[in-house]
Image (tube, helix red, strand yellow):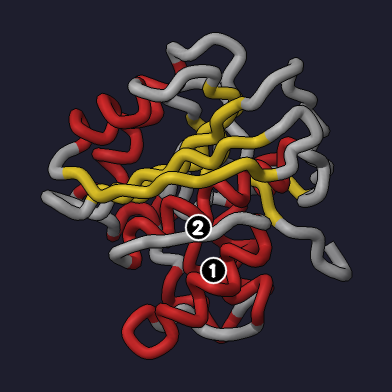
Amino acid sequence: MNAAKVSPSDGPKCIIGYDPGGNGNHGVACLTVNADFSSVSIACSSVETVEDAIGWASSHSQIIGVGIDTLTRWATGRSGWRPADLWLRKHYPAVQRSVASPNSLFGSMPVGGMCFMSWARAVPGIVISETHPKVAYYALNREVFDWTHRGERMVDWLGEQMGVRLAVDSEHEFDAALSAYAVRQGMAGRWTVDLHEIPAQEGESIVEPFGPSKFFWPQESGT
């Protein structure tokens, strides 16, 4: 499950993060990085619809990566469980309820997320990665995601990880920022696991409706 390192050409580039939170709560983020993947700046916002999120992302140039909190690939087995879902539930039992069976999901997350991916797929040379900000936060901190009580501390922590001043107005913007950060880490070769490389179980197959994608994840002992 090794994620390949990708090097941007000279000059600052953009990595987009997207959290499909529903009407008025679509979180978007643009993390600008140098050729060595050091951060330059980050801008975050909330927009009304998926179309607005696509428009916001399209207003940025030199996009090399996109992280989306959605199911970028599907599986054909029981309840739609995918290898990545089962791996996350096994490795993080404290937050396994955050990883729901795909067949139980509805609304903006699976639909809006895939609409956004369909736009991203048309960007030449782009790297697309699925993200799961809430479980990723726990994986990095061993602290349950709790925006209501820990939001300010969470924002300070993520800003420190990125090396930029981070200002967000909602957990959807935070999730978008963390999604962009995950893609930066994966493209730079700092997160060495790609959960989409876990093979399907016997009698099942993987479906990629909008083409191949990554699922960058921080290295864990025993993986």
Answer few, some or many: residues within 10 Å of disc 1's Cα (few below 14, many 20 plus, some between 14 and 19).
Answer: many
Please provide percent x and percent y for residue 29: 42, 44
> In this orientation, which residue lies closer to the viewer: 76 or 164?
164
Residue 49 found in image quarter: top left
Q: Is residue 40 above or below residue 145?
A: above
**Quick one: SS at disc 1?**
helix
- Element under disc 2: loop
Relative horizontal placement of residue 122, taking residue 41 as reference (left or right): left
Q: Is 29 situated left or right of 108 in this image?
A: right
How far apart marks 1 and 2 lie (CA) works out to 6 Å
Query: Which residue corresponds to the image point at 59% horizontal and 24% vertical from the top-left?
Result: 64
User: Which of these two is toward me, 33 or 191?
Assistant: 33
Image location (x, y in percent) of residue 55? 26, 25
The residue sitting at 65% across, 36% down in the picture is: 33
Q: Is residue 125 visible?
A: yes
Query: In this figure, which residue is indicated by the disc labeled 2?
Result: 132
The residue at the point 36 percent across, 56 percent down is: 173
Which amino acid is tagged 2? His
Residue at 47 percent across and 79 percent down: it is 145
Query: How would you rate the neighbour count of disc 2 (Cα within 10 Å): few for under 14, some for 14-19, many for 20 or more?
Result: many
Residue furthest to the bottom? 149
Q: Position of residue 176 (x, y in %)?
A: 42, 51
Whether label 1 touches label 2, CB < 8 Å = yes
The disc at residue 135 is 1
Confirm whether residue 70 shows in the render: no
